[in-house]
Image: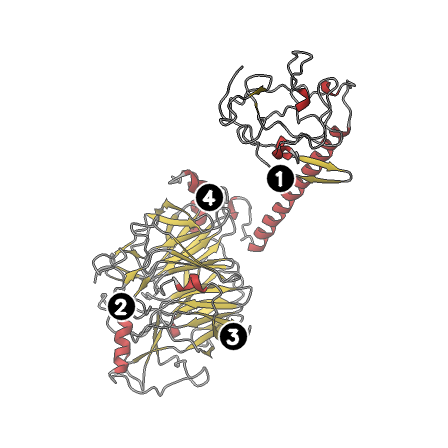
Amino acid sequence: MKGRCFPFVLLAVWGALGRLGLARELTSRDGANGSDIPSAQDFVRRGCHTVAVVGDYVYIDGGQVTERVNGSEPAESLAHDVNATWSIDMTEKWTNETVRIRSIPRAAPGLNEQIHWTDPSTNSLYTWGGFASDGSPPPQALWRLAADGSGGGSWTQVRQRDFAGFSKLLSPFGAAFAQMEDVGYALGGAVTQSSDGSVAKGMPGDAVPGLVSYNFETGDWANSTTTAYGGYGTSLGARAEPVPFGPNGLLLFLGGAETQVDATNDSISEVKWDRITLVDPVTQMWHSQTTSGSRPPTIEAHCSVGVAGPNGTYEIFLYGGVSDQLRGTSSDVYVLSLPGFVFFEGPKDAPPRSDHQCVVVGKGRRQMLSMGGVDGENRTFSAPTTADPWTYGLGILDMTELRWADAYDPDAPSYDSPSAVRQWYDAGNLADVQWDSNEVAALFMSSATAPTSPSSNTANPSPRPTGAIVGGAVGGALGAAAVGMISFLLTRRWRRRRAETPDSNPSPNPSSNSRSKMTPTPMSGPTPLPRLIHRSHGAEDEVAEYRPEPCPKDVEGGRYVYSPDSLPGGSGTRSPRPYSPYAEIPGTYGTWPSELPAYQDGIVAVRGGELPGTEPQIGELMDPNMQWAYELPAPLESRRAELPDRKYSR
């Protein structure tokens, strides 16, 4: 079969074995661990499940387990849905032989390839989507596990506050999902009659375009367009990782396959690693960046985790997956380092597997836990004929030393970038990165400047704790805020003193004020940008909002307002002087005309007249039949009042 690996076909075969009676009755269980957990000797495989860290525990949910029955061979063993959630305590040391697994009852249906998110603020695990192995569509629902802090918890169906948004969504499986703060994201996936009741199509189903988001706090759902992703805006069997670059963080999408919406076995093609696609989930701007180094083969249904290095880098670890390019299942680990977008090869001695899950564990975030996975034989998707070489499918990767182990240590040292990664940045290779666009370069290089390893700065290198990095960043932000506040206060004080200080050459005539000497100029160019308005009201100060200058056509009288008393009279032919709304009043700063309360209504503000013997009255209105010629210094009566935008002369 060309295209993505369909372990779901494998699961269907497993399920068929049980329905046809080829699997014998379950009699071998480890009663100490729980009725839904097979013993270490009987465990064969687990795939298409969920693994998530909530507090001090790892929770494993959904998928299917294959186990021996009365010493049966793996190919004759029973595969069944797991109707309980497992949990593992990550505060104590263990090996995959001594690990203690707890079972938690689950009221929700057991599904495969679910989307899952965690909410640390409420110690919650959310699951959505997935398909049923028996072919019957599950109800469209979002489920929440409220963890109790001791490895237990309770499942409940989430009541939708945004039912209108939720009801418009299809229920996918095999999507690429991740979360950033209090929002979960899911890209693509597929739907069939076994995942969504509104779909009548079987495998390979229909691809689902769009980037779905769910806000844990508000309960709002959204589905943004993904036409900029790949050739179809769809994604199957990919992985997503959030990375701390740019002002809002970014989502990177890794591997998988793409196809047209009406998918066929021949239309599905795996995504190459020569370019990585990413999106800013806030601005919804999509970008891509070319990669370098030892790129992986095309893979799907792999696992991935991300961890921040101590020197401004961020590494993403990839393990396993199935591949058209390899015609089989991968056992390799690859490391993608940012901001260099460079790949490095990792260990190759792990068992091949796909449809497993990985998470970062331990206080120092140095260890990657891999759980479960299946190994299809030459992509025939038959039932597994070999048991997992790792007990319970548990393996631990030291991400600094790039070494696999079967033991977990909660007190392992803090993560540091692998030596190959540090050497690459020490050699100055980041300066040679060819960015696909200036926008991508700004996102990554403004957040991390020329990462270097500790060995380049200290004689005795030691990993810098993540807390020190966070503390330094917070301290720098607070320092910058303090400097900005001091600068603002000094500037405000200087402006206040300037406003309160009289002119060095005072004049008794108000018209001699420097601002009142302004003469109207034709508005031939663009309207200047508005300036910041600062008012003083006794001891209290406030900074007014920006307000744009109104267009001359939109306001009677144009930019310069004339007092009615300044119009030509019968006693002379003197041209009127403009009444400037910019004349300074002691204790204030100048404002635009739009800031005067009467300006928009054509009411002249209270101010001394510019000509002898003139004094506008409070509330005095402008003549509505008067049309001003902006290029002339004097207002002229319009003989065509019905055409206010035309200019006339006497």
Residue at 27% across, 66% down: 6
User: Mark 2 Cα within 10 Å, few/some/many (few <14, many 20+)?
Assistant: few
Alpha carbon distance from label 2 to label 4:
43 Å
Q: In the rendered structure, find residue 545 and report the number of the disc placed on it.
A: 1
Across and down, in percent, residue 139 comes to 38, 72
Mark in front: 1 vs 3: 1
Alpha carbon distance from label 1 to label 3:
53 Å
* SS of the residue under disc 2: loop
The amino acid type found where label 3 is placed reads: Gly
The amino acid type found where label 1 is placed reads: Glu
* SS of the residue under disc 1: loop
Image quadrant occupied by the C terminus: top right
User: Mark 3 Cα within 10 Å, few/some/many (few <14, many 20+)?
Assistant: many
Is residue 50 among what the camera can see? yes
Alpha carbon distance from label 3 to label 4:
39 Å
**CB atoms of marks 3 and 2 within 8 Å:** no
Across and down, in percent, residue 30 comes to 42, 84
The amino acid type found where label 2 is placed reads: Ala
Q: Earlier in the sequence, mark 3 or mark 2?
A: 3
User: Mark 1 Cα within 10 Å, few/some/many (few <14, many 20+)?
Assistant: few
Mark in front: 1 vs 4: 1
Q: Earlier in the sequence, mark 2 or mark 4?
A: 2
Q: In the rendered structure, find residue 200 and report the number of the disc placed on it.
A: 2
Across and down, in percent, residue 551 comes to 54, 30
Disc 4: which residue = 443
User: Mark 4 Cα within 10 Å, few/some/many (few <14, many 20+)?
Assistant: some
* SS of the residue under disc 3: loop
Disc 3: which residue = 151
The amino acid type found where label 4 is placed reads: Leu
Alpha carbon distance from label 1 to label 2:
57 Å
**CB atoms of marks 1 and 4 within 8 Å:** no
